[in-house]
Amino acid sequence: LQDTRRMLHAVYRVGNMDAAIAFYEAALGAKLLRFREVPEDKYSNAFLGYGPETTHFALELTFNYGVDSYDLGTGFGHFGLAVPDVAAAVERVRAAGGTVTREAGPVKGGSTVIAFVKDPTGYAWELIQRAPPAPIRDPVAQVMLRVTDLDASIAYYTQCLGMTLLRRRENEGGRYSLAFLGYGPEEDNCVFELTHNWDKTDASAYPDMLGKGYAQVAISTRDVFKTAAQVRAAGGKVTREPGPVPGIGTKICATTDPDGWKVVFVDEADFGRELE
Ligand code: CO
């Protein structure tokens, strides 16, 4: 299938929209790109990111009126953010009142400097030091999800979503494996980081695995109908038939991976119109 897919945004719920926006701007250096208030349905959406949505990955925050916290479950891992100086980024997080759960320092057995912080709703952010000669093209680097069968997941992300397996790493000591999958090189594109803990091989190992906070990643496609057919042909589950969203008209279809993590394909041209 000839297609030009790109990871567009991650959709998730936050318990306090003002606090979330303030934290993402001050601590993580993101910009508010779009905001919509939908009082008739009692929610608001904010899109934050590091460049135009036509070329950059965005964070789509949903605030449901009156819901001030979410159980994030046990399967969602973190978002990854590439920064030129992790120690400085950690100080910005601290100054903005954020929680630092792992101070800046090299990864175990490696040289890449990382840190972990939490946003006001409790989502973990991995800060990853990247100091390339050119500026970082798009800082939002990873969506990390835990999976129970890495080979099944890799088959789904490559065959059903059409992604490339960019990197796979086995960590004997930590008894876990990582797989990085996406539509382009990790340096330039947000990718999925899938973590498989060797001792956790079925859903019972992760109570409330999917949680109530993180919802999905949206991916662009030229044709949601062909994409849905392809997902099915590759043995994947289509959870929302291809077609227009009532009221908006944007054509979408949805699918879930072997653990139930949701992906929504969005018609590229319709999405472009939404941004106008
Ligand atoms: Co990561």
Image (tube, rainbow, N blue to C red):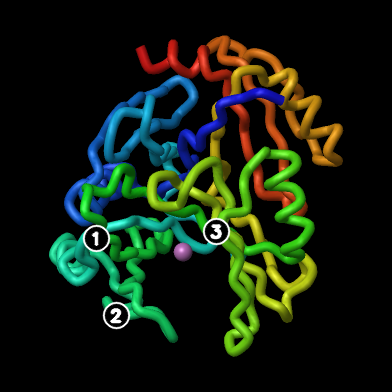
Question: Are the residues flagged by discs 2 and 3 in contact, CB closer than 8 Å?
Answer: no
- Judging by the rendered image, the residue that carries numbered circle 1 is 131
Residue 244, by quadrant, is top right
Query: Which structural element holds mark 2?
Result: strand
94 displayed left or right of 153:
left
Query: Which structural element holds mark 3?
Result: strand
Query: Which structural element holds mark 1?
Result: loop
Local crowd at mark 2 within 10 Å, few (<14), some, or many (≥20)? some
Instruction: Tell me what residue is drawn at x 32 percent, y 56 percent.
Output: 82
Local crowd at mark 1 within 10 Å, few (<14), some, or many (≥20)? few
Alpha-carbon span between mark 2 and mark 3: 20 Å
Front-most of 71 and 226? 226
Q: Which quadrant does the C terminus fall into?
A: top left
Alpha-carbon span between mark 1 and mark 3: 21 Å
Amino acid bearing label 3 = Glu
Vertical comparison of 168 with 30: above or below: below
Label 3 beta carbon less than 8 Å to ligand 1: yes
Front-most of 240 and 273? 273
Local crowd at mark 3 within 10 Å, few (<14), some, or many (≥20)? many
Alpha-carbon span between mark 1 and mark 2: 15 Å
Instruction: Tell me what residue is drawn at x 46 percent, y 37 percent.
Output: 9
Q: Which quadrant does the N terminus fall into?
A: top right
Residue 57 appears in the picture as rendered = yes
Q: Give coordinates of residue 199: x percent, y percent.
A: 73, 81
Q: Give coordinates of residue 11: x percent, y percent.
A: 49, 40
What's the mark number on residue 193? Answer: 3
- Judging by the rendered image, the residue that carries numbered circle 2 is 105
